[in-house]
């Protein structure tokens, strides 16, 4: 099982058998409030009939079309509709099947872009500590989670990492973006001095790091990264697999922070998680460099059998229709203050050492049990599940990212359940 304690699961299985709107149904017939949008992905809520109908229609109309040297209209239509949501000239899309594939695709685009322009020495990739960029070799290499890296050898060579920005001493219990910590971006100058800009292709960051416990960027931090990348001709990649599609109250974090990266990776919410799909958005200049920089034939030697799969595109367009019709890409603007008040109301309960939030994201950090990191977080997750709410344990952080359709009374239900669970902890 993926990222699962198999022995623990088999001793105490947890099965979900149905889902609708904000709730899962467990195999013992209980309603479980979804505090995590499944796995940060079911942004429009569960089992949306419109998406199911679009998928069924597509399968009977055109089930599959080869993606190499052939096209089909839905992929172009979906690409054109998506790019209208993006800031500036992020006008081109490469479709993948997951966030991990989107990340590895983006890293390959970055390296190939420099080579096509005659800067073939720019091969280094800069990630960040505590980053999660999926599980393929490139994503793990630029990722910053020790446990995900140490079993798998040397990964990619020529990778370096920025420090993460999480600091409990300075920023515990910040509401929204912390004021302190912009200077962490200046570490990029140090890394550039070490390797020389002429060897560096790209910097990749999650605008808000999700999987390691919702780490919120300090005020000015992302802007500073953008400035430094501009200064040295380094591409900036935002991994928006979690922050994309309305999580912060704007279509993308790039819109929210007012920072335009050169590439954006997405997945998850692109199809409301009904059908696997991911994508990479690139700025006009990158697309042009490939098309103009190649004499003839194929410009980018990369692709998946299922790139732009017709069924994924149909699911994605039906999802986009829902997002636009129901105003879900901006709905969080109306909920964020209530959400912030609700999550910070837990302050003072047992073991809580930090609470942080942005948009419709939050994390509650618990003091680890000595010599047993992660156990308290996992125990909280289990207690919540027993009490009827799905939350995500990221080590000793309880991460929350409910569907964007959540109502205020469901926010109350989520935090009441969490409070009960925390009070039950040993
Ligand atoms: C920021 C980020 N990038 C990439 C991924 C990987 O996506 P997938 O699991 O679809 O491969 C994730 C998954 O959680 C993610 O949060």
Image: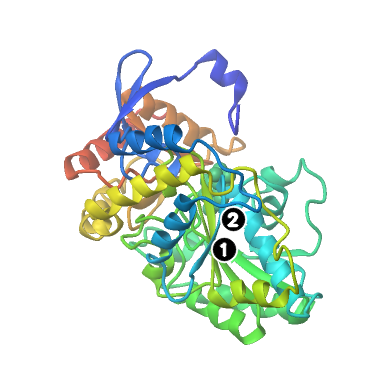
Whether label 1 touches label 2, CB < 8 Å: yes
Query: Mark 1 or 2 closer to N-term?
Result: 2
84 horizontally vs 20: left or right: right
Residue visible at 61% across and 51% down?
70
Q: Residues within 10 Å of mark 1 (few under 14, many from 20)?
A: many
Quarter of the image for residue 327 reads bottom left
Decide if ligand 1 comes within 8 Å of the CB at mark 2: yes
Q: Please identify the quadrant where the C terminus is shown.
A: top left
> Is residue 145 in view?
yes
From the top left corner, tell me how far across and down residue 12 is, in percent. Answer: 50, 15
Relative to residue 181, is residue 319 depicted above or below?
Answer: above
The residue at the far left in this view is 409
**What residue is disc 2 on?**
131
The residue at the far bottom in this view is 231
**What residue is disc 1 on?**
205
265 horizontally vs 201: left or right: left
Label 1's element? strand
Label 2's element? loop
Relative to residue 388, is residue 418 depicted above or below?
Answer: below
From the top left corner, tell me how far across and down residue 343 is, in percent. Answer: 29, 49
Quarter of the image for residue 60 reads top left
Q: How far is disc 1 from disc 2 in space, using C-alphas? A: 7 Å
103 horizontally vs 355: left or right: right
Q: Which one is in front, 156 or 82?
A: 82
């Amino acid at each position: 099982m993926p990222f699962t304690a198999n022995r623990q699961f088999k001793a105490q299985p947890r099965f979900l058998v149905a889902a609708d709107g904000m709730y899962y149904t467990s195999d013992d017939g209980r309603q479980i409030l979804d505090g995590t949008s499944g796995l940060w992905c079911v942004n429009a809520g569960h089992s949306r009939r419109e998406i199911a109908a679009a998928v069924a229609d597509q399968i009977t109309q055109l089930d599959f079309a080869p993606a190499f040297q052939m096209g089909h209209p839905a992929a172009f239509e979906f690409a054109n509709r998506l790019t209208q949501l993006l800031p500036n000239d992020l006008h081109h899309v490469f479709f993948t099947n997951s966030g991990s594939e989107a990340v590895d695709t983006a890293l390959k685009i970055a390296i190939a872009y420099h080579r096509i322009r005659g800067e073939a020495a720019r091969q280094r990739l800069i990630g960040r500590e505590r980053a999660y960029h999926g599980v393929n070799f490139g994503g793990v290499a630029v990722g910053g989670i020790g446990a995900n890296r140490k079993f798998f050898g040397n990964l990619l060579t020529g990778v370096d990492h920025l420090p993460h920005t999480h600091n409990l001493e300075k920023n515990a219990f910040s509401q929204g973006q912390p004021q302190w910590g912009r200077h962490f971006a200046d570490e990029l100058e140090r890394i550039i001095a070490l390797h020389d800009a002429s060897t560096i292709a790209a910097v990749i960051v999650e605008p808000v790091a999700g999987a390691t416990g919702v780490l919120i960027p300090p005020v000015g931090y992302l802007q500073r990264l953008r400035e430094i990348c501009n200064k040295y001709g380094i591409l900036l990649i935002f991994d928006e697999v979690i922050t994309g599609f309305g999580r912060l109250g704007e279509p993308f974090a790039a819109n929210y922070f007012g920072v335009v990266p050169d590439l954006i990776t997405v997945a998850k919410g692109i199809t409301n998680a009904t059908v696997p799909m991911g994508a990479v958005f690139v700025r006009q200049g990158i697309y042009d460099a490939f098309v103009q920089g190649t004499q003839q034939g194929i410009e980018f030697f990369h692709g998946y059998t299922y790139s732009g799969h017709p069924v994924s595109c149909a699911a994605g367009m039906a999802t986009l229709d829902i997002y636009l019709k129901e105003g879900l890409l901006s709905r969080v603007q109306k909920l964020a203050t209530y959400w912030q008040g609700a999550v910070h109301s837990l302050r003072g309960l047992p073991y809580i050492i930090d609470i942080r939030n942005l948009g419709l994201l939050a994390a509650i950090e618990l003091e680890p049990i000595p010599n047993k990191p992660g156990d308290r977080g996992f125990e909280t997750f289990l207690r919540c599940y027993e009490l009827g709410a799905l939350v995500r344990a990221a080590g000793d952080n309880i991460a929350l990212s409910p569907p964007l359709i959540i109502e205020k009374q469901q926010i109350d239900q989520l935090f009441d359940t969490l409070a009960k669970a925390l009070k039950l902890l040993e």
